[in-house]
Image (tube, helix red, strand yellow):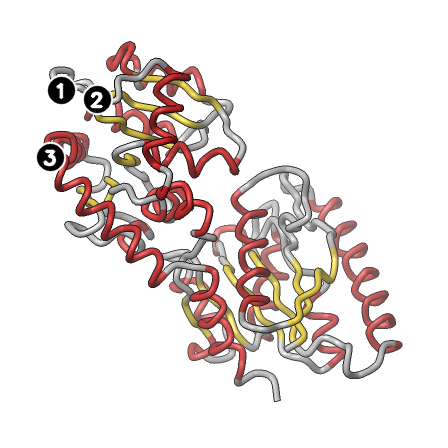
Amino acid sequence: MRVAFYAPLKPPASLTPSGDRLIARLLMAGLESSGNQVHLASRFRSYDRHGDARRQARIKLIGERIADRLIRRYRAMSAVKNPQLWFTYHLFFKAPDWIGPRVSQALGIPYVVAEASFAPKQVDGPWAIGTQAVVETLAMADLVIGMSVGDAECVRPLLSSPDLYAELRPFIDVEPFVAAHQKREAHRRALSQRLGLDMDDTWLLTVAMMRHGDKVESYQILGRALESMMIASWRLLVVGSGPATADVETALSGCGSRVLWLGECEHDRLPAIYAACDAFLWPAVKETPGMCFLEAQAAGIPVVGGRAGGVPSVVSDGETGFLTAPANATDFRAATARLIDDNNLRRLMGRAAARRMAERHTVVAAGNALNQMLGNLVA
């Protein structure tokens, strides 16, 4: 299948790291892994941060012009080279798709969206133009693939049929994490030497951006949970940075020198850090599962997370880690204490986590699932 891929929020070729860029790249890799020919149709960003109606109108005009150029280009190509399907990743009111629907209708090919959201309160708000575009786009979509828990409730009613909504399990490229797990002891020794860590202590890990709001609340819960366990021999490694760094430092101040601040790390450095640690912790207040839970488990370490949002979809409670009551520091503390106190339990859960990831959440597994979803759309 020949697929035209587009990500209006952030193109996969962007130089700025982000979760959106990573997922766009993973989706392209997943499609390619199952034998499809995928090309990036456009790098145009339709994102409007501030709700400026004039800017949105200008973005719309530019997007339509790009679409018209693509239509002319595709029509000039041989039929055997034209895209057979258009695939857009991440559609929402701040970054609508002004290109894909126009091209799809002109070429008579299926239009598919992965991860779409609709915010009813924005219908008459500052992003009204983008919101209306999302409504119209979803109405003509041939398939919408859900990737975040909670989106379906608002998105499904906008589709021409509720049957046009499917869900895709979260996934990552597990290979770097599997490779790191196989060299766990070497990575642990190297990190011990670099950071002055005692090899016999339990190393806990958190990987999260430091933003105001839900992120800070998660750090606060983490801090309250850990500061009541100062007798046990543990250290907390924190990977992340952001505008709320000072608030995060305050949230974890009760843990004193047990916290090591690693700052922002390049993604290719993360597998070794995950694999060297003993458990991953993140309360995940009001969050989708995020890549961190997948990455930690792929690296063979158990996790503790809040039982909310999409976290239960990627963590098997009692098998690959523990799910705790949402935003509950006491429950989070109890689950963390069990992992700190029981080396054998950590090993068993870590193995189960790695096995589950290899079976359910790989690029190849996602590619096969996507092919099943898309196969019926292309004659």
- Residues under labels 1 and 3: Cα distance? 12 Å
Residue 230 position, x and y percent, is 15, 16
> Residue tagged by mark 3?
342
Q: In the depicted view, which residue is nearer to us: 182 or 238?
A: 182
Residue for point 38% across, 17% down:
193
Q: In the depicted view, which residue is nearer to us: 132 or 213?
A: 213
Residue 38 position, x and y percent, is 66, 67
Foreground: disc 1 or disc 2: 2
> Dividing the image into 4 quarters, which one contains the N terminus?
bottom right
> Dividing the image into 4 quarters, which one contains the C terminus?
bottom right
- Residues under labels 2 and 3: Cα distance? 12 Å
Residue 175 position, x and y percent, is 45, 51
Amino acid type assigned to the residue bearing label 1 in the image? Ala
> Which type of secondary structure does the marked residue at label 2 adopt?
loop
Q: In the depicted view, which residue is nearer to us: 288 or 295?
A: 295
Visible residue check, residue 305:
no
> Residue tagged by mark 2?
201
Question: Circles 2 and 3: CB distance less than 8 Å?
Answer: no
**Marks 1 and 3, the one that precedes in the sequence:** 1
Residue for point 64% across, 48% down:
10
What numbered label is drawn on residue 97? none
- Residues under labels 1 and 2: Cα distance? 9 Å
> Residue tagged by mark 1?
232
Q: Quadrant of residue 213?
A: top left
- Residue sitting at the far bottom: 379
> Which type of secondary structure does the marked residue at label 1 adopt?
loop
Amino acid type assigned to the residue bearing label 2 in the image? Asp
Foreground: disc 1 or disc 3: 3
Question: Circles 1 and 3: CB distance less than 8 Å?
Answer: no
